Amino acid sequence: MISFSSSQRFFLYRGATDMRKSFDGLCGLVTNELQKPLSTGDVFMFINKPRNSIKLLVWDRNGFVIYYKRLEEGTFEIPGGDEKSVAIKWEELVMMLEGIALKSVKRRKRYACPSA
């Protein structure tokens, strides 16, 4: 069961990823390219060059889980920027998976709890 929440952090690796990579290959990208710890519960996202497949890697209590989605039509939008990875919000992940253009989304003002 997919059980992501807004309390998790989401990191999108911006480079094109070979979708033949599995647990060890994706873990290598996280540790070597992103310099992030693996077992924190953070979700790491990888998109292939044609942008029609996405893999999400997450540590789930006692092991890694990979979620994989391949589009039959269309592509995934990658947020702009020059960094190797970009932190995105849970809402943005949902919009990416549903095919909503992130650039056209207008956010209305909402209360945000100050960061500790």
Image: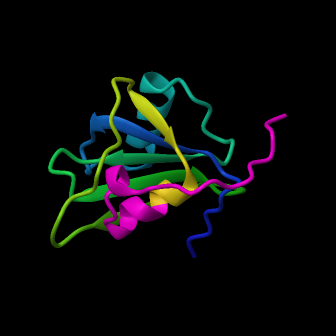
Residue 62 placement, left or right of 49: right
Which residue does the image show at 51% across and 28% down from the upper left? 31
Residue 37: quarter of image = top right
Determine if the magenta segment contains residue 16.
no
Which residue does the image show at 62% across and 69% down from the upper left? 3
Residue 63 placement, left or right of 7: left
Residue 33: quarter of image = top left
Query: Which is more toward the observer, 60 or 100?
Result: 100
Looking at the rendered image, the quarter that the C terminus falls into is: top right
Q: Position of residue 52 (x, y in %)?
A: 21, 59
Query: Which is more toward the observer, 59 or 14?
Result: 14
Q: Position of residue 1 (x, y in %)?
A: 57, 76
Query: Which is more toward the observer, 25 or 95?
Result: 95
Dominant secondary structure of the residues highlighted in magenta in the image:
loop
Query: Which is more toward the observer, 105 or 96?
Result: 105
Vertically, is 42 above or below 29? Answer: below
Q: Tell me the magenta residue range.
A: 94-116
Which residue does the image show at 33% across and 55% down from the upper left? 104
Residue 68 appears in view: no
Which residue does the image show at 37% across and 53% down from the upper left? 102
Residue 62 appears in view: yes
